[in-house]
Amino acid sequence: VRLVESGGGLVQAGGSLRLSCSASRSIYTIDVMGWYRQSPGKQRELVAGILRGGNPSYADSVKGRFTISVDSIKNTVDLQLNGLRPEDTGAYYCQAELRGPSGSTSNYWGQGTQVIVSS
């Protein structure tokens, strides 16, 4: 699965951005889609995820501010970022997980898009 992110940029605190992740195959064939963030000096962390046909889940730090959505026609997974804070700064990565019948998983990553929030 090839994933390509877009939509990052520089924004002032309180502002908004919309990130988009385009997948090279039908979203219906991907078991889990997620957005991860890696802030300077920190480990990569899950920001938002959604199971195929399931409800989204969010990290506590972004609940009420970020929204993940799937467009099955465009095969994209978007992340709407509202009420941005300086601590939201980081590289945002799109991730796709495929689950095999034996319980194995395969993970695919995009190249990342940078979000910088100024105070």
Image (cartoon, rainbow, N blue to C red):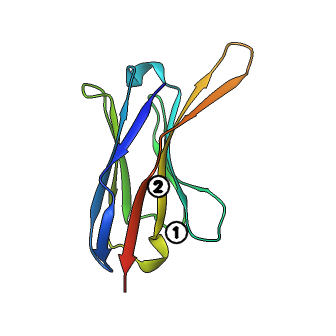
**Vertical arrangement, residue 89 with respect to residue 86, above or below:** above
Name the residue at 29% across, 53% down. 7
Residue drawn at x 53%, y 58% is 37
Identify residue for label 1: 61
Q: Secondary structure at mark 2?
A: strand
Identify the residue at image location x=74%, y=14%: 102
Q: Position of residue 83 (x, y in %)?
A: 33, 73
Answer above or below: position of 18 versus 76. Answer: below
Q: Is residue 70 left or right of residue 44?
A: left
Where residue 36 appears, as percent x and y from the top left, is: 53, 52
Residue 117, above or below 78: below
User: In the image, which disc is placed on residue 92?
Assistant: 2
Q: CA distance from mark 2 to mark 1?
A: 15 Å
- Mark nearest the camera among 2 and 1 is 2
The residue carrying pointer 1 sits among few (fewer than 14), some (14 to 19) or many (20 or more) residues within 10 Å by Cα, namely few
**Residue for point 58% across, 70% down:** 40
Amino acid at pointer 2: Tyr
Can I make out residue 37 in this image? yes
Q: Position of residue 73 (x, y in %)?
A: 25, 25
Going from N to C along the chain, the mark reached first, 2 or 1, is 1
Q: Quadrant of residue 101?
A: top right
Q: Quadrant of the C terminus?
A: bottom left
Residue reaching furthest to the front:
111
| Few, some or many residues within 10 Å of mark 2 (<14, 14–19, 20+) | many
